[in-house]
């Protein structure tokens, strides 16, 4: 796991690549490397920052150059041993044991045809000295990031957007459409980028640049097609052995020459992976979090620590408990910097603090249960949307009465939040809407009217575009299964846009690699071969995964109430962050520039403070967006108006 960067036919490419690579130092504190070579009427420059995980010797150093190919690579190949054996049998000689060398040899032998054969998480750039071509590649599901920027015939790329901003000398302009999208989702979808000229290479795709200026794009993996194939397998009566597929993926993800630990929240996903990992590596370490008692009580948070301790004791895991009592005023700007784009999920703080503690203890690699909820319908929104279909059959007068009664209830008292009321209000906000609209409203921050009221009137067309993009992605499938349609939309948008993005950026900020065994191509194939009525059974979400885990975990862990990998936002907002919220509403750059409307923001603050609505998540994101916007526009001399 590393940081990669480079330029291709870019003016002053060497100095720019040095800047790019320096910004990525936290991603690879174990070493740095550079490569340059003529390319047409310019040159290619490749940079690398190394976090040594497999083959800790110099034979694993990058950029790796061999017989006219140069590679800078970020990631892990979990089927590297099989590929190595196949290539060795074909006469390839390897100098070391790194998967980087395997990838280089696979590319030499098969070119882009090797890409569907790769099982792992990766983003890389490979340059062919003979043809002068540079190819950029990103893994099938977007686990690893790759940002790029093209100007004229030149290209610049890096693992992080902040590096491109530095490489461009602060000349990048904010894309206000991306900021509108971030308000809707509380993250920037993978199809958009916070700066106008920059873009994210789509998951499962490659981009080739030639010395004559031509640019070619290709796709080697398509999640929509994988979901369709899974539906056909299910129709044919083929049922995957989920337990076997997940155990195989977990075993592969333990491949490392340095210690590996796990996240252990005490929930199903992380407990399952931790129990499987403990079979392979007895005494493995795990890290879990708790919160200040007063914060947890106010937020009505479940006692996840109790379950984490139970799992650790049962499987002989060395459990490290971390209390999250952060100075959020200090952490907010720091996390905003590392997250690259406005991301309003406070779980990024949890990830950063856990990874920091693990790194201090000498751990470089951690396993996370990320992805299971998206693939197996484990979020409350999935069950809620299924229940909404049943609710729509309730007589309309009765529904009106329920809605009126719930509307009058407060979401918090002065002493604690009323979590069930928050859930009820959220459910009723989308329960009677059409399918795509209901699904969007079940997890986004605003409906169309609320978003239009919050942003500048000049951005009304942008709001329509952002909402239309969600509808287009959601409907782009031929699945006849409602639950799997939701899972597919999540795997295409929510997973790479939010969860994988903050996991990568916040863990690498602590120079730690996080691996995600559920977000594995074979697990994904198996997941979409499971019909929706096996994922949600009655009022039980993630039923198929629970059934698979039951042979490993005790029933009280498998069927415990769902926990939250989140933070006590309402407590933070009412105490630690209240002065900052007031400052942003009354004198923030987003308000003064006209991008956000002060009156709409002030109403949100007032309703949240009175306990009538829960806007804590919305306001946290506004704080994150304000910090990001200040940094993105500072010193540029540009007009800040939207």
Image (cartoon, rainbow, N blue to C red):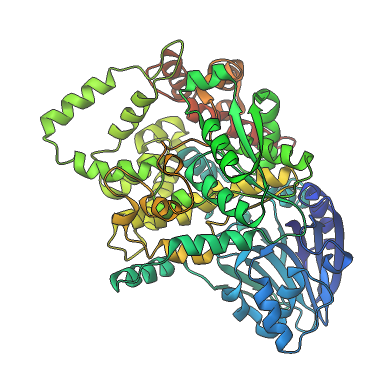
Quick one: 135 or 7, which is closer to the camera?
135
**Residue that appears at 36% across and 40% down:** 442
**Residue that appears at 64% across and 27% down:** 323
How many labels were placed on the picture? 0
**Residue that appears at 81% across and 75% down:** 41
Can you give x and y, in whole percent of width and height, for residue 248 in the image?
55, 64
Can you give x and y, in whole percent of width and height, for residue 377 in the image?
39, 50
Horizontal side, residue 350 vs residue 470: left or right? right
Q: Quadrant of the C terminus?
A: top right
**Residue that appears at 80% across and 60% down:** 48
Q: Quadrant of the N terminus?
A: bottom right
Can you give x and y, in whole percent of width and height, for residue 249 in the image?
56, 62
605 up-or-down from 459: above or below: above
Horizontal side, residue 31 vs residue 498: left or right? right
Quick one: 262 or 74, which is closer to the camera?
262
Residue situated furthest right in the rendering? 58
Instruction: Answer whether residue 411 is visible to the viewer in this image.
Output: yes
Within the image, what quadrant is residue 326 found in?
top right
Instruction: Answer whether residue 638 is visible to the viewer in this image.
Output: no
Within the image, what quadrant is residue 606 found in?
top left
Quick one: 545 or 618, which is closer to the camera?
545
Horizontal side, residue 635 vs residue 501: left or right? right
Can you give x and y, in whole percent of width and height, for residue 71 in the image?
77, 70
């Amino acid at each position: 796991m590393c940081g990669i960067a480079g330029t291709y036919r870019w003016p002053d490419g060497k100095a720019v690549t040095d800047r790019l690579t320096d910004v990525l130092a936290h991603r690879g504190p174990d070493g740095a490397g550079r490569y340059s070579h003529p390319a047409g009427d310019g040159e290619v420059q490749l940079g690398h920052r190394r976090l040594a995980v497999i083959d800790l010797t110099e034979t694993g150093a990058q950029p790796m150059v061999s017989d006219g190919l140069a590679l800078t690579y970020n990631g892990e190949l979990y089927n590297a041993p099989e590929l190595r054996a196949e290539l060795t049998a074909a006469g390839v000689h390897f100098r070391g044991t790194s998967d980087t060398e395997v990838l280089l040899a696979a590319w030499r032998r098969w070119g882009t045809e090797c890409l569907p054969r790769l099982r792992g998480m990766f983003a890389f750039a490979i340059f062919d000295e003979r043809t002068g071509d540079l190819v950029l590649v990103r893994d099938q599901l977007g686990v690893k990031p790759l940002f790029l920027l093209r100007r004229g015939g030149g290209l610049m790329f890096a693992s992080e957007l902040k590096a491109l901003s530095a490489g461009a000398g602060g000349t990048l302009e904010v894309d206000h459409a991306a900021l509108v999208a971030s308000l809707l989702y509380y993250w920037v979808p993978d199809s958009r980028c916070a700066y106008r000229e920059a873009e994210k290479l789509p998951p499962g795709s490659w981009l080739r640049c030639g010395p004559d200026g031509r640019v070619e794009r290709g796709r080697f993996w398509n999640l929509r097609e994988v979901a369709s194939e899974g539906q056909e397998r299910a129709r044919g009566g083929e049922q995957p052995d989920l337990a076997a597929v997940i155990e195989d993926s977990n075993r592969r993800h333990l491949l490392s020459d340095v210690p590996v630990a796990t996240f252990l929240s005490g929930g199903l996903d992380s407990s399952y992976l931790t129990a499987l990992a403990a079979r392979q590596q007895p005494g493995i370490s795990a890290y879990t979090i708790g919160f200040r008692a007063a914060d947890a009580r106010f937020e009505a948070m479940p006692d996840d620590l109790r379950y984490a301790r139970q799992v650790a004791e049962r499987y002989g895991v060395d459990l490290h408990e971390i209390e999250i009592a952060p100075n959020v005023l200090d952490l907010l700007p720091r996390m905003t910097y590392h997250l690259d784009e406005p991301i309003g999920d406070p779980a990024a703080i949890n990830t950063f603090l856990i990874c920091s503690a693990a790194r201090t203890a000498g751990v470089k690699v951690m396993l996370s249960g990320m992805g299971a909820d998206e693939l197996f319908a484990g979020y409350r929104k999935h069950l809620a949307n299924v229940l909404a279909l049943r609710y729509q059959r309730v007589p309309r007068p009765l529904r009106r009465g329920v809605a009126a009664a719930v509307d009058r209830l407060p979401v918090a008292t002065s002493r604690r939040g009323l979590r069930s009321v928050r859930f009820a209000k959220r459910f009723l906000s989308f329960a009677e809407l059409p399918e795509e609209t209901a699904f969007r409203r079940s997890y986004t921050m605003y409906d169309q009217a609320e978003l239009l009221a919050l942003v500048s009137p000049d951005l009304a067309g942008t709001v329509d575009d952002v909402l239309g993009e969600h509808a287009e992605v959601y409907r782009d499938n031929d699945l006849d299964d409602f639950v799997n349609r939701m899972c597919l939309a999540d795997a295409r948008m929510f997973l790479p846009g939010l969860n994988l993005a903050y996991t990568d950026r916040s863990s690498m900020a602590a120079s730690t690699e996080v691996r995600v065994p559920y977000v594995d191509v074979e697990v994904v194939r198996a997941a979409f071969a499971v019909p929706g009525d096996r994922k949600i059974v009655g009022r039980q979400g993630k039923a198929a995964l629970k059934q698979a885990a039951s042979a490993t975990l005790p029933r009280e862990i498998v069927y415990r109430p769902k926990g939250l990998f989140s933070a006590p936002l309402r407590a933070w907002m009412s105490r630690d962050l209240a002065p900052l919220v007031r400052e942003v509403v009354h004198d923030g750059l987003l308000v003064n520039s006209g991008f956000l409307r002060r009156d709409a923001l002030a109403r949100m603050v007032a309703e949240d403070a009175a306990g009538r609505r829960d806007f804590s998540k919305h306001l946290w994101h506004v704080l994150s967006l304000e910090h990001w916007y200040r940094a993105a526009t500072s010193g540029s001399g540009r007009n800040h108006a939207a």
